Every structure is written in structure tokens, then in C-alpha cells.
Amino acid sequence: MKKVILITGASSGMGKVFAQDLAKEGHIVYGAARRTDLLNDLSKQGVQTISLDVTDDESMKFCVQTILEKEGRIDVLVNNAGYGSYGTIEDVSMEEAKRQLDVNVFGLARMTQLVLPGMRKQKSGKIINISSIGGKIATPFGAWYHASKFAVEGMSDSLRLEVAPFGIDVVVIEPGGVKSEWATIAYENLIKTTENTAYKDMADKFKQAFEKTIAKNAEPQVISRLVSKAISAKRPKTRYVGGYMAKPALFFRKWLGDRTMDKVLLSQLPK
């Protein structure tokens, strides 16, 4: 069945692939992003594009209202907008920490608030939150990013219980390593914030370790297939996992104690 789907953060990476793939499946897809110039190629592929800044309330309200006026409904919201701000807790400014949470948590929550009244009225809908295995496992230097994704995990669990009586599903997608600009942004922030600090040597080793894995990261289509599966399923899973090392990492996190997990994570840094 053709659905009206709104995807945030559709200008690059996974969000762009979600929009392309779901449009090919015949859905009415709205790809939303702040960098609208990067949405032009989506327009040529049958995706409706719309401006959206998830840190601006008026922008979020305008986006949702525009779609509702044109289509009469929003069946699926894919909360994909987000980024990774890396650096130590000691060195990252509170301003940047708040921005990380504003984009990854509060923007997601506000978009959810805006689409829920319509979904409740039609007694159906799906909220798909793009989290990360970083919402279950924390690495050095990613405290604010992990805090945001841990929050998305908990928020999604509460939301799922609240909206179940209205026929609305809440799904969490937990990607592992996926090819995108995410890593570049995260590591640039890391090097910038630790350049002249006591953590510089450790940060350099951390970046070296993860640069070795970038080539092994999964194509975003792997996660796109999970999103499509969640949308088409009559009773979707509450969580879907995919991408490089996602399932093994979550397996170890589940069964290893904190101290052992710490040793495993730190062992990945070059000597």
C-alpha cells in the first residue's frame, strides 16, 4: 500500500538512500533537510523535497503542515536527522553539547509531537527512529553522541507504550558501521577539540583505529532495507540491527561486564 513518508536528514548518507529506495517502491516520499541544495537530485527521482531545520520550531511546524495540507496525512515519520560530535567531556563546550542533544534528541522529539495528532486521528502510523549501536555501547570521546542515542532508545521505548492503543508503531533502527559523511564529521570534531589537550595522543590512536574499519563499513542500502521492512510489516519488530559489526558488538555488550567491555574497547587502540 502506498504511504506518505517524511524522512528528515535526507540530504546525504542514509537519509538520501532511504528517500531514493522508498520512492522506487512507489511511496509518496518527502525528503527534508536543512541543506536544500543537496536535495536537487532527489527531486529528479520522484522524491518531494522540503526545507527542514530540526533546531528551528517554525521550520518543523511549516514542514509538517505543508505535507498535511498537500497529502492529507503522514503515514510514516523517519527521524534520521543527526550527527556525531566527538571530543572528551572535559573539552567539548556546553554549547556544542547542547547542540548535539538539540539535533539528535529534541529535534526528533518535536517532529514526533507534530505528526502524532494526525496519526492518532487516522488510528495508524509508524515512527521510525534512527538510533545506533552507539545507543547501547559507549566508546571513548563520544559521550555526547552516545548520550543522545541512549536517550533516543529510552524515549522510543516510552513512546511505543504510549501510542500503542492508537494503532501507531514505534521502531528503532540500530546501525553499526555504515558508509557516510558521519565518521568524517565526528573525527574532525575529535581532532579539533583535543588538539592541544592532555587527550591528544589517545584521540590520535582512536582515530587511527577507526580509520582502519571505514572501508569495511556497510553500504547504506543495508539499513534502507531494514527501514523498508519495518514500513511494510503489519507488526514490525521494535528494533532492527544492521551494518558492520552491529550484531557482534551488541552481543558482546549484552553478555560482558562493564570492566571486560572496557578492556575490549581500549584494546582496539594502537599501542
Image (cartoon, rainbow, N blue to C red):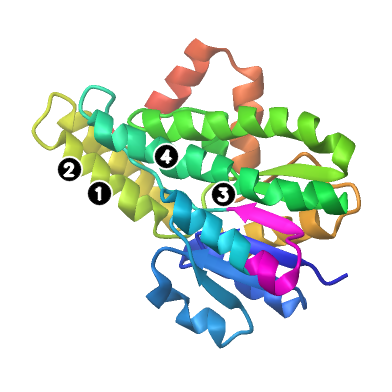
Residue placed farthest to the bottom in the image? 44
Q: Which mark is residue 102?
A: 4
Of tags 4 and 1, which is closer to the observer?
Answer: 4
Front disc: 4 or 2 = 4
Q: Position of residue 50 (x, y in %)?
A: 52, 71
**Disc 1: which residue:** 188
Q: Nearer the viewer, mark 3 or mark 1?
A: 1
Disc 1 to disc 2, C-alpha distance: 6 Å
Q: Evaluate if marks 1 and 2 touch, with contact meaning CB atoms under 8 Å apart.
A: yes
Q: Amino acid at mark 1?
A: Glu
Residue 188 versus residue 161 in the image, above or below: below
Q: CA distance from mark 4 to mark 1?
A: 20 Å
* Part of the protein shown in magenta: 67-79
Residue 45 figure quarter? bottom right
Which of the image's four quarters has the C terminus? top left
Viewer-proximal residue among 245 and 228: 228
Q: Which mark is residue 192?
A: 2
